[in-house]
Image: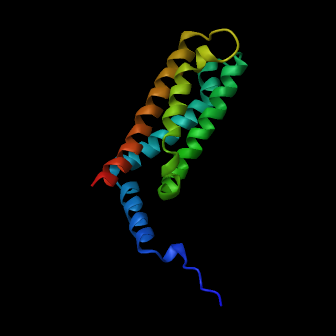
Amino acid sequence: MTMPTPDIEQHPDVAVMRHRYDQIAETPVAQYADGLTFLAGLYLAMSSWVIGFTDHSALTMSNLFTGIAVALLAAGFVAAYGHFHGMAWVAPVFGVWAIVAPWAVDGATPDNTAIVSNIITGAVIVLCALAMMSGGMRRTRR
């Protein structure tokens, strides 16, 4: 005789958690932070061509891949915050990487416009990601 295994989706705590995550995702701070993070990721991905430092191929590839990853992560937060909240700590790491990448990647140090672009974009990513994370932490403390 086998007992039917209960479906976790039917557990009342799951519905409460989903509702809480939906509330977090609907706040203006979360929406602005998600949108700015997405835009910053797109800008970081194309910044080598916008600023004109494609001759630094290592930094160009680093910015391209990091920017795409940030944009995808931000899109994931918009689409399903409840599923992506555990990865929220990754976005600030990407922002810090964008800040230090001009000196950390292989090759000559790029010119000041590339460095300033990376620092500003990385700082925007870090600040927006911390804002996204703080919304979830604030709600869970109550």
Q: Nearer the viewer, residue 59 or 24?
A: 24
In the rendered structure, the answer to whether residue 80 lies left or right of residue 136 reads: right
In the rendered structure, the answer to whether residue 70 lies left or right of residue 27 reads: right
Q: Is residue 123 above or below residue 74?
A: above
- Percent from the top left, x then y, of residue 15? 42, 71
- Percent from the top left, x then y, of residue 46? 62, 31
- Percent from the top left, x then y, of residue 73? 56, 45
In the rendered structure, the answer to whether residue 18 lies left or right of residue 56 reads: left
Given the current orientation, which residue lies at the most extreme left position?
A: 142
Q: Which quadrant holds the C terminus? A: bottom left
| Residue at 43% across, 65% down | 18
Q: Nearer the viewer, residue 52 or 14?
A: 14
Given the current orientation, which residue lies at the most extreme front position?
A: 1
Count of picture labels:
0
| Residue at 59% across, 10% down | 111
- Percent from the top left, x then y, of residue 101? 59, 20
